[in-house]
Image (tube, coloured by chain):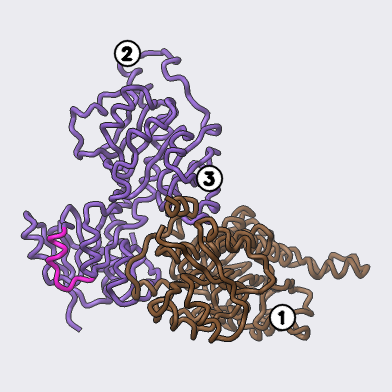
Chain colours: A brown, B purple
Amino acid sequence: MAGKIRALYIGPDKTDIEQQTRAIKAVGGEVDRFHGGGTGELIEALKDVDVAMSQGHKFDPQAFAHMGLNGRCKGLVSFGHGYDGMDLQTAVDNGVVLANTASFGTEEVSNHTMMLFLVCARKFVLHHKLVTSGVWTREHLPPMGHIAGQTFGIIGIGDIGRAVARKAQAFGMKVIAYDPYVSSWDAKEYGVESVDSVEELARRSDYISPHTYLTEETRHIINKSVFEAMKPTAYLINCSRGPVVDEPALIEALQSKKIAGAGLDVFEKEPVDPANPLLKMDNVAVTNHYASYSEVAWEQAQTQLGEEAVRIATGSWPMSLINPDVRTKLPPLKKAKVWDVYRRELQV
Amino acid sequence: MAKKKVVILGIEDDPLQYERAEMEDLDVEFIQVKPDSEGEAMEAVKDADAVMMRGNWGTEQVIKATEHCQVLAVYSHGFNHIDVDACTEKGIILTNGAGMCAEEVSNQGVAFLLALNRQVVQTTNRLRKDGSWDRSAYLPIGALDEQVLGIVGFGNIGRQVARKMSGWRMRTLVYDPYIAPWIIKEYGVEQVHELNDLCSRADYVVVVVPLNRETYHMIGEEQFRAMKDTAFFINVCRGSVTDEAALIKALQTGQIRGAGLDVFEQEPVDPKNLLLQMENVITAPHIAGNSTRSAWLSRERAAQQVAAVLRGEWPMAGQNPEVTASIPARKRAKARQPQVVV
């Protein structure tokens, strides 16, 4: 391989970074830790490395001007799935390759979605409260869906959306999806029916669940007009990002019984305000943004962080490139290969 | 804006129903040419904004003869007959008919697998010949739910083969160094990192890769040596992915038990090709992609790609992403309803 690679880990000082640096060590590379400080210190630290990894740290886009085409550091790998905190365009302009740790929590998020969907469909929150307070009644059961034969609507049919689709199908549900970037042949392979608009999805679904990134295109993609279109018996599940849903519109829809309820792992403002009316409703199930968590998922993400860092540092595309327009600024790089195969090639 | 010129090579006097429908919102002019020579093809594409192609006209000479072409769309799934590097150098987006026959090709692979497992062709032939009722002649017959399927290449087609055979509860191995691990997980298959490892463990080896520099003769002497002597080899992609001489030898010496072949290194296949004389080899004349649907879907798909590029988008079936190093960024094309309702 071409020289020894050097990576910068940007994250909490106390974190044990054995998993994050495993891949880099495996190919004989070295890792610096960023010990905090301002943008100036960050830019300074980036000068001596081939790639940066960030975990739980907001990366100042000003630093991109000293990377990519204008510095040694070719790119940045960011822990997690969502990249709404990242300035993709500035990275593209400077030829900086960006990657995330795609799909690390696909199982977890899709499971969490199914959990919230069942909690809603079976009216668990209300009945748990009634039973634990000594009330034994069946008067609040109707309307309650049969699940099998009902329609599950997914917005965004990426890794997580597809896992949800597969699981919903296992419950006997019909799955429809809105994702304008998915080709008809892929939709067919996933066994879902593609619909042309969020409104159509809203009209037809008994449960709606977004699985999109948060971008300008998806901000408030679930809004007042979507709630107007939804069935009064339908539920909204959200395990993606809070601002994908217009929260005041959701609160209004719940208060006026335009929809039956919601299961939420995320909120527009986090940590959620304890006075948020969503926390007081018997038809709303809530968790504190941990849908992607399990030890296995976390280890997967942290290991992938290092693997993507090695790919970028050694002139390969990462497996999960999140700013593909950067291709227009760079000469063609090696196509990303599976880690075990790529590691062997580097070590030869 | 000036009318865009779409040159269609290899098709003549066709109403172009799909091409016209998909590009209805664009100001385009279609020119159909069935060239007799490379020179004629070069002349035809000179001032094209888009070229659509059936047949082997995608040579370096023809591609370089274009002056302001933005896209070259092939009607087929494979594009091994196109000089991809020349396209990329010229800043031309190359598109294929992605997905237009994945259903058909995967079914052909599955059909070969089942036919070999059940020895359907062999039983038919012997019964027809002399009514032979010697049932032991077909043994051993493996139980699929205990056997191992090895898929080489996990694109659209490979995934469909895996999905379909999961209904048989086969254990499935996949070799594809470019496939993201999460896709492997989604399909519940096992990823192996060495081709020979897959070959040594599989009872059926199915290859479904595009033919390119990397995959030319990727299944050769070494791979056949690694395979079990009870294994079947199935090729439904391109002939030259296999070293045919090595395949013939492996079959003659009993290194593998049989083969299902839709494709050959030379096509049409030489009637004297030894593969056609072997009882343990079942064949088809490169028809894996064919069906009444794929016939028109290839037209629709290719037309959608050209339309997307002429609208300034990055097409869904773009096959040379490296080209973006030399052309400006484009927005991804969004899915559109087919314009011709069948």
Taking B38 as reference, is A14 above or below it?
Answer: below
In the rendered structure, which amino acid carries the disc numbered 1? Pro
In this rendering, position of residue A148 left or right of residue B326: right
> Which chain does the numbered disc 1 sit on?
A
**Residue bearing mark 3:** B190
Q: Secondary structure at mark 2?
A: helix
Q: Which mark is residue A271?
A: 1
Q: In the rendered image, which quarter is residue A222 located in?
A: bottom right
**Residue bearing mark 2:** B130
Task: Say yes or no: labels 1 and 2 on the same chain.
Answer: no
Nearest the eye: B323 or B44: B323
In this rendering, position of residue B270 left or right of residue B42: right
Q: Which mark is residue B292?
A: none
Q: Residue at x 46, y 72 (%)?
A: A75
The residues colored magenta run B60-70
**In the image, residue B286 lies at what x, y percent?**
27, 41
CB under 8 Å between discs 2 and 3: no
